Image (cartoon, grey):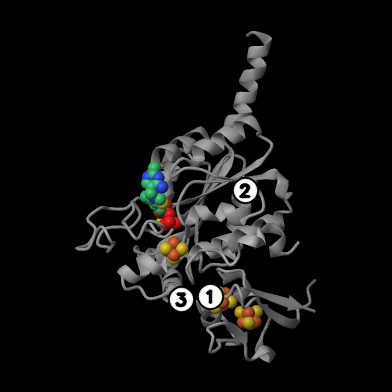
Amino acid sequence: MGKKPKLKEHRINRNWCKGCGICVHFCPKNVLELDSEEKAVAVRPQDCIACKLCELRCPDLAIEIITE
Amino acid sequence: MATKDYIRERFFPHMWCPGCGHGIVLNGLIRAVEQLGIDKSNIVMVSGIGCSSRISGYLDFHTLHTVHGRALAFATGIKMSRPELNVIVPMGDGDALAIGGNHFIHAARRNIDMTAIIMNNRIYGMTGGQYSPLSGYGTLATTAPYTNIDHSFDIVELAKAAGATFVARTTTYHAQQLPDIIKEAITHKGFSVVEILSQCPTYFGRKNKEGGAVEMMERMKDNTTPIGSKAKQENQSLIERGIFIKKDMPEYCSEYGKIIERAMKGK
Ligand SMILES: Cc1ncc(C[n+]2csc(CCOP(=O)(O)OP(=O)(O)O)c2C)c(N)n1
Ligand code: SF4
Ligand code: SF4
Ligand code: SF4
Ligand SMILES: [Mg+2]
């Protein structure tokens, strides 16, 4: 508690992701992109501040932020 | 517990369209229940018919998927027989306020302890984009190709006037406020109404040239403001969000319990 959580990984469920782009557009740090199959991927994980907004806004429960 | 502990994974990926706001409501509702730490087996979710109502199938609570517009009537029966359970009633705007409008005002008037969540996408999503009582004047729908001339309800005003003792509004864009408000609504003893502005990119968005889910959510950010904000005073067209009413009033099941006691004593 009190300490900022540090990112371990973006766990993205490719079978559930429908490529709506919500997580990509609203990420404050521009960490995510859609790949050639229209699935979300973390292309700049080093910039992630683990705010979990992507996780909370995903309509498909397809993205989870795992912290240390 | 993790999100997965609250859902019926076998039904995923769910049937909602890409970017459908109803999925964000599902997401926020899970967070709310998780944070409250309520046992899944003490929750009954009752829904009617609509894309929104499909939410009950995805959640691993006790669930009833009933008939269009009548979820609150079924929920009333459950709550009256098992008042100790938490009853949550997610509804579509058509479900709650067109066909179900009468049930809605009377459940509010009775102040029966349950949480009504209105997933307001301003359209009949499930049946192909007909206008609803929330579409609003000037909008386009499959059944209003030359624009809708019906004026819309204001769910918050309606719920307040009908007697709901907890009334709040948020949107699918406001992903942190959403679970917070649901938590307060569930905890409140009495009839709680939470309006959640939700996007239907497939029908409302497309018909009204509002773009996709992302653009519709940008609009929710731009068109809403916290209750009583300075922005609201300067721009009356902004939609307020937050908790409008939270007050204590005798609750229906508790009052009914007292009637039973009185009747048993014969006076
Ligand atoms: C008694 C009855 N009348 C009409 C219908 C057809 N019907 C199914 S869903 C629906 C409206 C859905 O709109 P809404 O409640 O706003 O939910 P959404 O799909 O937009 O989430 C209608 C009219 C029905 N199933 N039952
Ligand atoms: S918000 Fe969810 S469904 Fe949409 S692109 Fe991101 S991970 Fe995929
Ligand atoms: S946790 Fe926050 S910063 Fe990290 S990817 Fe998600 S939205 Fe972006
Ligand atoms: S039709 Fe609209 S409300 Fe129904 S699932 Fe698709 S986007 Fe959601
Ligand atoms: Mg609707």
Element marked by disc 3: helix
Q: Chain for mark 1? A: A
Indicate which label's residue lies in the foreground, 1 or 3: 1
**Quarter of the image where the C terminus of chain A is located:** bottom right
- Residue at 78 percent across and 77 percent down: it is A3
Mark number, residue A48: none
Q: Residue furthest top?
A: B266
The residue wearing badge 3 is: B214
Question: CA separation, marks 1 and 3?
Answer: 13 Å
Q: Residue furthest left?
A: B146
Indicate which label's residue lies in the foreground, 2 or 3: 3
**Quarter of the image where the N terminus of chain A is located:** bottom right
- Disc 1 and disc 3 in contact, CB within 8 angstroms: no
Residue B126: x and y, percent? Answer: 41, 57
Q: In this view, does B85 lie above or below B196?
A: above
Residue B123: x and y, percent? Answer: 36, 58
Q: Chain for mark 3? A: B
User: Are the residues under badges 2 and 3 in a single subunit?
Assistant: yes
Amino acid type, residue under disc 1 in the picture: Lys
Element marked by disc 2: helix
